[in-house]
Image: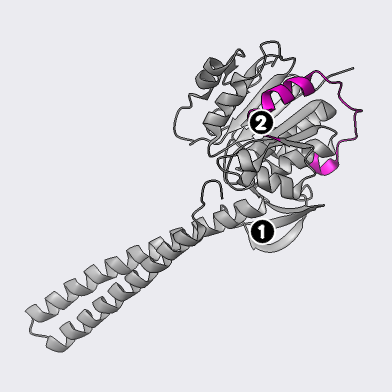
């Protein structure tokens, strides 16, 4: 009987230290392949394989697309690529962002669930917002085990806390307890193979195909919301304890990630408005100077009035941006 030989792990803010501690505690004879998504900047090189490889006995690498994976190895998602799992190989795909990031946890977890079902252990560590929640739900629906770092133990508790709120997580544990727990579960026999739900298969294919979603193959029902990234209609996907969203292009969001993306869009729009008003101040003052040079006092006064109005508008919108940042700024451990 097959064991739990596929371990998928996700982390974001605070994740580098957490992953180093976790991998440092894993045994050298771990009978499982480990796949890791750590949210990283798409434009910067990642030293995660070196850090994780030096932290413990298991070797770590950025895999090549199509590489055959094996037990006792840690595979780390490279920047700007989704890390996906097939029956025996690793895929790297530059598909649509999920939860505003690539690599993202949900595509990895979902691909593992589709191809390995009850043999999968999914683990969500420290991080902001809700990436990993939908992935853990897929793991559970396909017969696997879902774990989270105890939010009280996490530097940034959002990711494990949202998973607990929206999924029937099998177990929570502190970072100190997780290596032994994973080692024990990896040696236990997996449960029976379940039928993989059609919607989980479809969403896994979206990440694998790197293409837009064609008509007739979408999941969920159209909502009255638009995608913050492409402007398309978002479909609402209902799950027993969760609602999430995906557009025709393939961008996907949990509710926390969607709210954060909307705030980003609003902030960008307000910043553009401030910039435009400041440019208007420069224009109006230039026109006022030109009018005064021609002895046109009334015209100069009108331009000065417009410049003052533009200055006031820029200050008002700038205050709104500051208030928006204050209202949405996360607090570690809170």
Under circle 1, the secondary element is strand
Q: Is residue 98 above or below residue 121?
A: below
Image label count: 2
Evaluate whether residue 255 shows in this view.
Answer: yes
Q: Residues within 10 Å of mark 2 (few under 14, many from 20)?
A: many
Q: Is residue 39 magenta?
A: no
Evaluate whether residue 85 shows in this view.
Answer: no
* Residue interval drawn in magenta: 173-201
State the residue in front, 128 or 40. Answer: 128
Query: Of all residues shown, which one is farthest toward the bottom?
Result: 298
In percent of the image, x 53 and y 30: which residue is there? Answer: 16
Q: Is residue 175 magenta?
A: yes
In this rendering, the label closer to the viewer, 2 or 1: 2
Q: Is residue 228 above or below residue 152?
A: below
State the residue in front, 227 or 71. Answer: 71
User: Which is nearer the N-term, disc 2 or disc 1?
Assistant: 2
State the residue in front, 239 or 68. Answer: 239
In percent of the image, x 66 and y 31: which residue is there? Answer: 9
Q: Position of residue 192 (x, y in %)?
A: 92, 28
- Report the disc number at residue 9: 2
Residue pointed to by mark 1: 233
In percent of the image, x 13 and y 76: which residue is there? Answer: 290
The N terminus - image quarter:
top right
């Amino acid at each position: 009987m097959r064991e739990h030989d596929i371990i998928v792990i996700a982390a974001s803010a605070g994740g580098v230290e957490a992953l180093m501690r976790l991998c440092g505690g894993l045994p050298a004879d771990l009978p499982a392949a480990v796949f890791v998504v750590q949210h990283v900047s798409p434009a910067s090189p990642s030293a995660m394989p070196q850090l994780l490889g030096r932290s413990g006995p298991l070797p770590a690498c950025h895999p090549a697309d199509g590489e055959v994976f094996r037990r006792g190895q840690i595979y780390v998602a490279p920047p700007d690529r989704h890390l996906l799992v097939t029956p025996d190989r690793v895929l790297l795909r530059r598909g649509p962002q999920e939860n505003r990031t690539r690599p993202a946890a949900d595509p990895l977890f979902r691909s593992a669930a589709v191809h390995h079902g009850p043999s999968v252990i999914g683990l969500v560590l420290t991080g902001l917002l809700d990436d990993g929640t939908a992935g853990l739900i897929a793991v559970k629906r396909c017969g696997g085990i879902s774990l989270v770092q105890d939010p009280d133990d996490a530097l940034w508790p959002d990711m494990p806390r949202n998973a607990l709120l929206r999924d029937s997580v099998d177990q929570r544990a502190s970072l100190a307890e997780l290596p032994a727990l994973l080692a024990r579960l990896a040696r236990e026999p997996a449960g029976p193979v379940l039928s993989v739900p059609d919607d989980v298969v479809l969403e896994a294919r979206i990440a694998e195909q790197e293409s837009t979603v064609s008509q007739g193959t979408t999941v969920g029902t159209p909502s009255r919301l638009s995608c913050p990234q492409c402007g398309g209609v978002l479909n609402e996907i209902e799950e027993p304890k969760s609602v999430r969203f995906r557009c025709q292009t393939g961008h996907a969001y949990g509710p926390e990630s969607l709210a954060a993306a909307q705030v980003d869009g609003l902030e960008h729009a307000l910043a553009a408005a401030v910039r435009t008003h400041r440019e208007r101040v420069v224009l109006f003052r230039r026109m006022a100077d030109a009018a005064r040079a021609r002895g046109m006092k009334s015209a100069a006064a009108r331009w000065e009035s417009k410049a003052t109005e533009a200055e006031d508008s820029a200050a008002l919108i700038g205050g709104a941006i500051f208030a928006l940042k204050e209202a949405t700024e996360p607090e570690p451990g809170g």
